[in-house]
Image: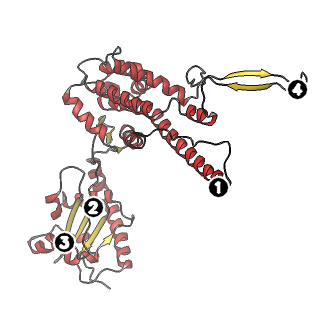
Amino acid sequence: MGDIGILNSIHAWQRPTAQHRDAWLIYGPFYDKRWVNDGTISPLTLYCYLKARFGSPNGPTMAVRHPSPSNIFQWHYVVAHNDRVMHFICRTDNLELIPQCDIAPTPDEWRNFVVSLKTEFKKHGPEISAIRKTLEKWQLFVNPFARLEQIIHSFETRVAGRTPPILPQLPSQASKARVKELSAELERFTQEMVALKATCLALKILAPVWGESFVNLLLLVLAKPELKSDERLYGNLIRQEIDIRIRSLHLNCVGFTTAVDPDSGEFKQFHTLMNERNDVLHGNVNPTALQFDHVYLDSISYDSNGPHHQIPLFEDERNLADRLMQGLAYDITSERVLRDVDVVRKFIASVLACIQPSYREPLQIVMANPYPGWRKDIGRIDVLFDDALVFGLISENGP
């Protein structure tokens, strides 16, 4: 059995005093006796319990903690009993309980401690509930704009500078060895063409979606309080046609110095892009929209009772397979889709230029964060955690 007096005396825990100074400051010598929370303890409930009994976190790492939620050490409590202490350290990766003892507690001793601790939670239920009510409740959500921006940047990198592969020349005659080689070359050609076409098509579809997600995020951040607080009004706002949403931004949002100009090139090009997106997504078939070539057919009959022969004729000399394969990528070439992305970027820049700097700069911070927070009770959105997560590793020799 380990020296677990500190574990068996939960009800008698106190704040550390001067006699605990060394163990309060340096927990490295007994770090190997720690227990890492396996999910049986709620960090939220434990924090509220400790704060109800001992006030604000009092561990030494709080002195080096950054004020924001982005930290290696989120919170740190130290409690004492007799001449021993216990550290409760919540890091970005886990919650650790570090008792000052000579022999590491056994698994059974830790299980018994957790049971006793949960019993304490029940005894202090009203105090824990009171502390919990003082906490701000935020909802973390995925930022569609930031997520799409990352995906689009990745696709741009794949597409930039790439041209469709060239169909291998198919001779009228070839040796068996050459036929085998041509078969492999045709397979590579098909794979490269399909991969490029798929990436370009993804960009073509996502570019306008990215632009629309910008408009919706802007409304979430800058919509007037009376609209945010009324779910029906806000729901109606975000369901309006995209051009109406854009043209009424200055009416429905704070921070706009001027309306978005519907006659500007940026607006018109983006609106055209949105309409094209609808055609692609809904599979609208318009033979005049995606034409890439002309073919003439001559119908010949050699026998009045026989079938008519349809003979295709083209104005220029090209391999039919190459003609049709290139036609599949007619409107989704790398140059075309990269222009679409540029249209969205210019549109976003033009809208941001209509917003006062004091509103624009916080908006741009939210735009760049993939997982901002939403506080529903006051209708506020903010960045709680940095895009680059902070974490730390403890050496094998302890802290």
Element type at mark 2: strand
Q: Residue at x 50, y 36 (%)?
A: 201
Question: Residues under labels 4 and 3: Cα distance?
Answer: 102 Å
x and y percentages locating residue 280 in the rendered image: 53, 29
> Tag 1 or tag 2, which sits nearer the N-term?
2
For the rendered model, the colour scheme is secondary structure
Q: Nearer the viewer, mark 2 or mark 1?
A: 1
Q: Nearer the viewer, mark 2 or mark 3?
A: 2
> Tag 3 or tag 4, which sits nearer the N-term?
3
In the image: residue 198, left or right of residue 180: left
Considering only vertical position in the picture, is 335 above or below 107?
Answer: above
Indicate the amino acid at tag 3: Ala
Mark drawn on residue 306: 4
The answer to whether any part of residue 142 appears in the image is no
What residue is pinned by disc 1? Answer: 177
What residue is pinned by disc 2? Answer: 91
Q: Nearer the viewer, mark 4 or mark 1?
A: 1
Mark drawn on residue 80: 3
Q: Quadrant of residue 89?
A: bottom left
Dots 4, 3 in contact, CB < 8 A: no
The answer to whether any part of residue 205 appears in the image is yes
x and y percentages locating residue 281 in the rendered image: 54, 30
Element type at mark 3: strand
Quadrant assignment for the N terminus:
bottom left
Question: Residues under labels 2 and 1: Cα distance?
Answer: 64 Å
